Image (spheres, helix red, strand yellow):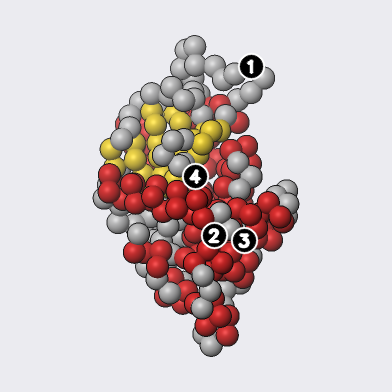
Amino acid sequence: MKRIAIGLVSAMALASCGGDNADNNSTAPAAPVAGASAPAGTAWVDTVVKTPEGGFRMGNPDAPIKLIEYGSRTCGHCANFAVTGMEPLKAYIATGKVSFEFRDFLLNQIDVGAALAGQCAGPGPFFPILDQMFAEQQTLMGNGPKQGDPFIQQVEAMAPQQRIGAVAEKFGYLAFVQQRGVPEAQARACLADAAATDALVKAAEAGQKKYNISGTPTFILNDKVLENTGTWPQVEAALKAAGA
């Protein structure tokens, strides 16, 4: 996917991150679905699996309302949705009527390492790490090299997979997941995993081809793209219109 090949400095512009701002007004979701109980001793918000499409889904796998987000971990609008929307969205997921799946969409080189690191611990910690990564996005992006930093030339001379790990470490994603329980050796192995990188790229390409994604976040509701929708109030309105 061409967007992944852009240079490190231009990647920091994050030009393909889009969306509108809106107030975070929220109302309570509808009552739970009859018979849609989570497995004994758990809640639907704790039920997380990796999907065949490469995303991570929270909630009832048979929920009648299925929400998917194609998001970039370096996108400010995606971070805004995570910070303002994830907690109220969980109230809908808890009813069993709504499931939510996050699929990493790669806008730049930074996203690749961030996604590899963020997925490294598996389904259980996936959403807490994702939410915290978005909450700390400005700090992480501030770790990047400034104009004239020799790191920029050094990293461009590296092999592609080595470059991914170096960029992830420079921006602080390696330390970030270590601080959240991922051993350093495991995190470095994830960043060096060429097969996982290829799977990320192919999943993003498949999403782009199927849904004609032009920016992030892009939301899919019951397999239909939500046009001009990038904030929690907009997404909530769509969920309610679908019967949530």
Q: Is residue 63 left or right of residue 152?
A: left
Q: Which residue is mark 4?
A: 85
User: Could you tell me if the residues under marks 3 and 2 are in contact, i.e. CB atoms within 8 Å?
Assistant: yes
| Disc on the earlier residue, 3 or 2 | 2
| Disc on the earlier residue, 4 or 2 | 4
Q: Residues within 10 Å of mark 1 (few under 14, many from 20)?
A: few
Q: Is residue 167 visible?
A: yes
Q: Which residue is mark 3?
A: 173
Q: Is residue 100 visible?
A: no
Q: Residues within 10 Å of mark 2 (few under 14, many from 20)?
A: many
> Looking at the rendering, in which quadrant would you find the C terminus?
top left
- Mark drawn on residue 198: none
Q: Which residue is mark 1?
A: 40
Mark-to-mark CA distance, 4 and 2: 25 Å
Instruction: Identify the residue shown where x is 68% and y is 51%.
Output: 186
Instruction: Identify the residue shown where x is 45% and y is 60%.
Output: 75
Mark-to-mark CA distance, 3 and 2: 8 Å
| Disc on the earlier residue, 4 or 3 | 4
Given the image, on which type of amino acid does mark 4 rest?
A: Gly
Residue farthest along the bottom direction in this orientation: 148
| Disc on the earlier residue, 1 or 3 | 1
Mark-to-mark CA distance, 2 and 1: 36 Å
Please provide percent x and percent y for residue 13: 42, 72
Please provide percent x and percent y for residue 113: 54, 60
Mark-to-mark CA distance, 1 and 4: 27 Å
Mark-to-mark CA distance, 4 and 3: 23 Å
**Is 34 rendered above or below residue 120?**
above
Mark-to-mark CA distance, 1 and 3: 35 Å
Closer to the camera: disc 2 or disc 1? Answer: 2
Given the image, on which type of amino acid does mark 2 rest?
A: Gly
Q: Which residue is mark 2?
A: 113
Closer to the camera: disc 4 or disc 2? Answer: 2
